[in-house]
Amino acid sequence: MKWSKQNIQQYKEAKEYIDTLLIPLIPIQFSPDDALEKNAFERELLEILSYEIEKDLAGRMMLTPHYVYLKGADKESESHRLNCWVKEATVQPFNHCFFMTFDTTWKKYERQLEGTLLWLPSMQSGDLRSSEMHTMIRDQVKQISELIRSYWA
């Protein structure tokens, strides 16, 4: 389920089955210029991946709005803010929380997070409409979905 009015209405009727939260972590950086393009590409790719994972795990997962932060921000503070999101979410029956990102700097703060970090290796660029990219996305979605399912067992 996505964070939309229609999906939230459905969630309220079936919340005992939807126990997993997926929070995409999106860094933003305005300089240097080449970082703009890389950040924009990674945001687009992460958005596609998160939507496809949500579709694959429909009925069990809620996809939150993206968590956007400055790339150079203090990750300790950001970890605290993320944990506030998780604390707020546990008011609902979410038993599992996953953070998905291409940003390697989160690995250092992984243990501080009140959830599981899914770090994905980054791609510098590519054509998101190409058949090769679609194949790569399908493969990634399958692997990530299997990993998330392993936490349900």
Image (spheres, rainbow, N blue to C red):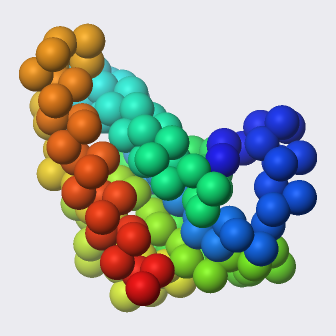
Rendering quarter of residue 104: bottom left
Question: Is 68 left, or right, of 25 in this rendering?
Answer: right
Residue at 53% from the left image edge and 59% from the top image edge: 22
Question: Is 84 left, or right, of 126 in this rendering?
Answer: right
Residue at 22% from the left image edge and 47% from the top image edge: 140
Rendering quarter of residue 60: bottom right
Q: Which part of the image, by quadrant, shows the C terminus?
A: bottom left
Which one is in front, 57 or 46?
A: 57
Residue at 53% from the left image edge and 83% from the top image edge: 114
Q: Is residue 148 above or below residue 152?
A: above
**Residue 146 visible somewhere in the drawing:** yes
Question: Is 56 left, or right, of 37 in this rendering?
Answer: right
Q: Is residue 30 above or below residue 23?
A: above
Residue at 24% from the left image edge and 35% from the top image edge: 137
Q: Position of residue 23 (x, y in %)?
A: 53, 57
Which one is in front, 144 or 57?
A: 57
Q: Position of residue 20 (x, y in %)?
A: 58, 69
